[in-house]
Image: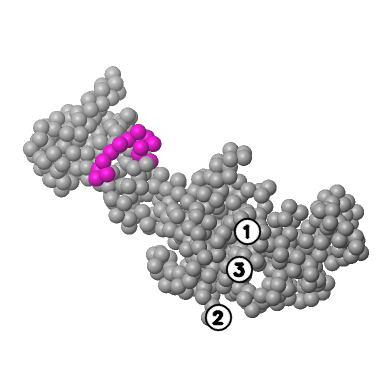
């Protein structure tokens, strides 16, 4: 790596939800910047106003906040290279496009949409089903390379709609070093003459990304491998604008692949296979289409980040769980894989399970409160923390909390009497009716060990096996054959609530037995 100050950027278009791949790009940028004590910039590339979606920029900001990957500079934070929205930088770009025209590296193209469509139809063949505006086709079109200078000036004077296109060399070889892939070469004759400045005066991605990276002093540019075919255009722009010595080092990140088959993981794959591919819930304001996210499903942000970094990177060891501090210390681009990484939702849940299991109960309780409020349950933080401590080993996502804990917050609505009634008898009923008043001698919130000792002591007196009593007791408390250790449940519920549930349970078993024997 050269000695330049490290400055990296994430430059999304505000067109919708933030895909896993986008968050991973943020993460790799962030870790690289922090490892080298550099700066991470968020730049909004909103030059294509036809695709702009209201709320998308705010959504991106919220995603980064949730993940703990906040930028040092951004549209909302500002910074020394503001503005950080390309639409607010529109006046900057034309001068550079005109500079390229003046130096012979770009040209004006006056073709109408109808003429472009006619070209595509006219030149379409089996071998070339999608003709492009390239070094061959441009000789047949209406542009400043085929028109006389006087015609060009007249068209410009009349404000005739036009674009500015890069003039790609016919048969040059361009080579650059990718930080992940090593030396990469392209033949320029295989690349079309990309539009740099649109008829509305807005730059395309190709021009804007180069100009902004230069002006913002970006030292390293990391993006998905789908942008690799655009690299020749960008390299030429850096050269033609005279900035080659300040061109960033490139790294084209591997794709995140669908779990089954080949190809990039898409939203459709998530819908088909039943898992999210967006960081957070997203509702498209144009179509009202809803897409679920990892946050709302119940992923912890630190688990989400840990899972993402392992999709295409490792530190060379068997370690899988990393704190953000460890990742910053260990991250390097030479450990990023060239090949795509298949997304495994079960593995993602495993990461989340590890983090839930090791998270302190009070923090978990705070995260769970909104979910409980949605069910109109308003329990105290201390009580929720107790419950979280008992069930967190069973949770892979926080949204599973209710199914593993509902009986702590409401009495069972149904009872699995079928598991109890065949072996229910007067002796067992007498045990529970005898134990009820004995519980009054215990503290209101007894420990599990105290409850268990009292339970076993009475069972011994009445000569009933403890194992035959625990299942009926569990079902009294929870309604079924599930839940944490039964005395932990009773301890958390407290004496008064446990007594009420025992009384209801005894009555329920008696009625069920009477019905069965009738």
Q: Earlier in the sequence, mark 3 or mark 1?
A: 1
Residue 107 vs 360, above or below: the answer is: below
Q: How is the image coloured?
A: one colour
Label at residue 215: 3
Secondary structure at numbered mark 2: loop
Q: Nearer the viewer, residue 224 or 517?
A: 224
Residue of label 2? 2
Secondary structure at numbered mark 3: helix
User: At which x and y percent is residue 424?
Assistant: 23, 31
User: At which x and y percent is residue 421?
Assistant: 27, 30
- The local crowd at label 1, few if under 14, some if 14 to 19, many if 20 or more residues have their Cα within 10 Å, is some
At horizontal 25% and vertical 34% (from top left) the residue drawn is: 476
Give yes or no for residue 372 being in the magenta stretch. Answer: yes
Residue of label 1? 89
Q: Quadrant of the N terminus?
A: bottom right
Q: Please state which of the two labelled residues, at mark 3 or mark 2, is closer to the viewer.
A: 3
Residue 281 vs 77, above or below: the answer is: above
Q: Earlier in the sequence, mark 3 or mark 2?
A: 2
Q: Is residue 450 left or right of residue 247?
A: left
Q: Nearer the viewer, residue 275 or 334?
A: 334
Cα separation, mark 3 vs mark 2, equals 19 Å
Q: Nearer the viewer, residue 396 or 63?
A: 63
Secondary structure at numbered mark 1: helix
Q: Earlier in the sequence, mark 1 or mark 2?
A: 2
Q: Is residue 256 visible?
A: no
Q: Quadrant of the C terminus?
A: top left
Residue 197: quadrant of the picture = bottom right
At horizontal 30% and vertical 36% (from top left) the residue drawn is: 378
Q: Which residue range is magenta in the image?
A: 371-383
């Amino acid at each position: 790596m050269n000695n330049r100050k490290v400055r990296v950027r994430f430059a999304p278009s505000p067109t919708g939800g933030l895909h896993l791949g986008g968050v991973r790009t943020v993460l790799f940028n962030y870790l690289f910047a922090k490892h080298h004590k550099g700066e991470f910039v968020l730049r909004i590339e909103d030059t294509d106003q036809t695709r702009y979606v209201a709320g998308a920029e705010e959504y991106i900001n919220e995603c980064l906040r949730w993940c703990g990957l906040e930028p040092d500079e951004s549209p909302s934070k500002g910074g020394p290279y503001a503005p950080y929205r390309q639409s607010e930088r529109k006046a900057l770009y034309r001068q550079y496009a005109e500079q390229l025209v003046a130096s012979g590296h770009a040209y004006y193209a006056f073709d109408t949409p109808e003429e472009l469509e006619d070209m595509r139809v006219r030149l379409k063949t089996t071998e070339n089903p999608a003709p492009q505006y390239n070094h061959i086709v441009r000789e047949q079109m209406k542009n400043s390379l085929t028109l006389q200078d006087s015609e060009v000036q007249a068209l410009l004077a009349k404000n005739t709609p036009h674009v500015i296109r890069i003039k790609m060399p016919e048969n040059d070889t361009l080579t650059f070093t990718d930080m992940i892939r090593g030396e990469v070469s392209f033949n320029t004759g295989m690349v079309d003459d990309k539009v740099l400045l649109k008829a509305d005066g807005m730059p395309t991605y190709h021009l804007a990304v180069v100009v902004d990276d230069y002006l913002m002093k970006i030292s390293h540019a990391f993006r998905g491998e789908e942008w690799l075919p655009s690299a020749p255009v960008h390299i030429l722009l850096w050269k033609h604008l005279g900035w080659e010595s300040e061109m960033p080092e490139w790294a084209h990140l591997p794709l995140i692949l669908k779990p089954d088959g080949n190809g990039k993981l898409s939203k459709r794959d998530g819908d088909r296979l039943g898992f999210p591919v967006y960081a957070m819930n997203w509702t498209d304001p144009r179509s009202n289409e809803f897409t679920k996210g990892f946050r709302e499903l119940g992923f912890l942000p630190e688990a989400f980040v840990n899972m993402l970094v392992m999709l295409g990177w490792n530190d060379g060891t068997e370690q899988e769980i990393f704190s953000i501090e460890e990742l910053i210390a260990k991250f390097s681009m030479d450990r990023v894989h060239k090949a795509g990484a298949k997304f495994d939702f079960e593995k993602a849940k495993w990461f989340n399970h590890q983090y839930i299991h090791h998270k302190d109960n009070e923090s978990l309780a705070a995260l769970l409160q909104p979910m409980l409020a949605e069910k109109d349950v308003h329990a105290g933080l201390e009580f929720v923390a107790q419950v979280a401590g008992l069930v967190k080993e069973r949770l892979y996502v926080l949204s599973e909390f209710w199914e593993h804990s509902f009986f702590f917050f409401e009495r069972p609505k149904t009872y699995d009497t079928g598991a109890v009634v065949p072996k229910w008898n007067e002796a067992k009923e007498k045990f529970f009716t005898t134990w009820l008043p004995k519980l009054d001698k215990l503290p209101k919130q007894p420990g599990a060990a105290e409850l268990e000792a009292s339970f076993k002591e009475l069972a011994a007196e009445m000569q009933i096996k403890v194992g035959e009593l625990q299942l009926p007791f569990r079902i009294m408390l929870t309604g079924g054959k599930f839940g944490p250790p039964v005395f932990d449940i009773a301890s958390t519920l407290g004496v008064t609530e446990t007594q009420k549930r025992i009384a209801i349970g005894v009555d329920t078993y008696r009625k069920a037995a009477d019905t069965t024997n009738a």
